[in-house]
Amino acid sequence: MFNILLEAVYEGVIIVNEQQKIAEANATAAKMFGYSREELIEQSLDILIPQRYHAEHGAHFNSFMKQRESRQMGHGRDL
């Protein structure tokens, strides 16, 4: 059921664990970044983030994890 819903979503969805490893991604997200879904699974989220943002992103991610409320990551940014 989860996979059916994940693939039905129009937007790209990437789900990561607390170590910032990609646990799941839908086909839309994979296509957006030029990967297959299988290539993304278990990879570090950093492969999708430009190198110049890696250090800053870690702090954003930790802040997001501390405030576990439902919200869109990257809201207001051109991802």
Image (spheres, rainbow, N blue to C red):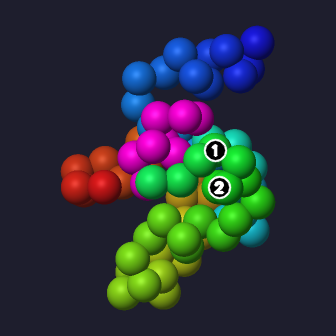
Q: Secondary structure at mark 2?
A: helix
Front-most of 59 and 44? 44
Front-most of 20 and 29? 29
> Magenta stretch: dominant SS?
helix
- Please give the name of the residue rendered at 76% of the width and 12% of the height, measured from the top-left corner: 1
- Residue 55 image point, x, y percent: 48, 87
Three-letter residue code for mark 1: Arg
- Kindly indicate the quadrant of the structure image that contains residue 3: top right
- Please give the name of the residue rendered at 24% of the width and 56% of the height, measured from the top-left corner: 77
Quadrant housing the C terminus = bottom left
Front-most of 54 and 38? 38
Relative side of 1 to 14, left or right = right
Q: Secondary structure at mark 1?
A: helix
> Disc 2 vs disc 1: Cβ atoms closer than 8 Å?
yes
Residue 37 is labelled as 1
Position above or below: 69 against 63: above
- Residue 47 image point, x, y percent: 54, 71
Position above or below: 13 against 63: above
- Residue 23 image point, x, y percent: 74, 49
Residue 40 is labelled as 2
- Please give the name of the residue rendered at 47% of the width and 35% of the height, measured from the top-left corner: 28
Which residues, given as a range, are shown in magenta?
26-33
Q: Is-magenta flag for residue 56?
A: no
